Image (tube, rainbow, N blue to C red):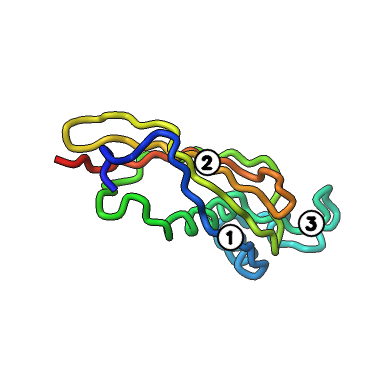
Amino acid sequence: MYFNDIKLGTEIEISPATIDKERMIDFAVKYDNIPIHTDEEYAKSTHFGKLIAPGVMSFMSVWAKYLEVDLFGEELLAGKSTKIEWFKPVFADDVLTSKAVVTALTDRNEKNGIVELTINAFNQKDEKVLSAVVEAVVKKRR
């Protein structure tokens, strides 16, 4: 989809993402190797009571589902930025549902513009677990 065709406020439904325990631990061992993510005995002694998913892994699980939508298609030129905020822990077997909303459109030049999307993800208890603001550079129709 070209920048010119995108409307402010457009909502994009994203398929649910389930947090698989084995994949969660594997990710943590590789990229965020701290006990709250990798050591079940340690995690039991914390106020969480069990392992929590690395925040970036939680976001990437939602992001992978967003990419299945392929909103921009071949008109996507590049990612520009991502800002993630976490609100609640994510646990193994949580199911994250989310929606992306076009929250800003910035005319950059005659060739492209910047699309800002805000993605909010909720667990199965309808608790907001994370919010991400991402920017993408998208081609303009000529």
The spot of residue 49 in percent (x, y) is 83, 55
Q: In the rendered view, tell whether residue 107 sits above or below residue 85.
A: above
Mark 1: which amino acid?
A: Ala
Residue 29 marker:
none
Instruction: Please tell me which residue is depicted at 48% across the width and 40% down the height of the picture.
Output: 101
Q: Nearer the viewer, residue 140 or 50?
A: 140
Q: In the rendered view, tell whether residue 21 sits above or below residue 122.
A: below
Dot 2 falls on a residue whose secondary structure is strand
Instruction: Please tell me which residue is depicted at 82% across the width and 62% down the height of the picture.
Output: 41
Mark 3: which amino acid?
A: Ala
Q: Which residue is mark 1?
A: 17
Left or right: 86 as drawn, with respect to 46? left
Real-space Cα distance between discs 3 and 2? 26 Å
Q: Nearer the viewer, mark 3 or mark 2?
A: 2
Residue at the extreme left of the image, as rendered: 142
Instruction: Please tell me which residue is depicted at 47% across the width and 48% down the height of the picture.
Output: 12
The spot of residue 45 in percent (x, y) is 85, 54
Q: Nearer the viewer, mark 3 or mark 1?
A: 1
Residue 132 marker:
2
Decide: few, some or many residues near mark 2? Use Cα within 10 Å; few <14, some 14-19, many ≥20: some
Residue 43 marker:
3
Among numbered discs 3 and 1, the one appearing first in the sequence: 1
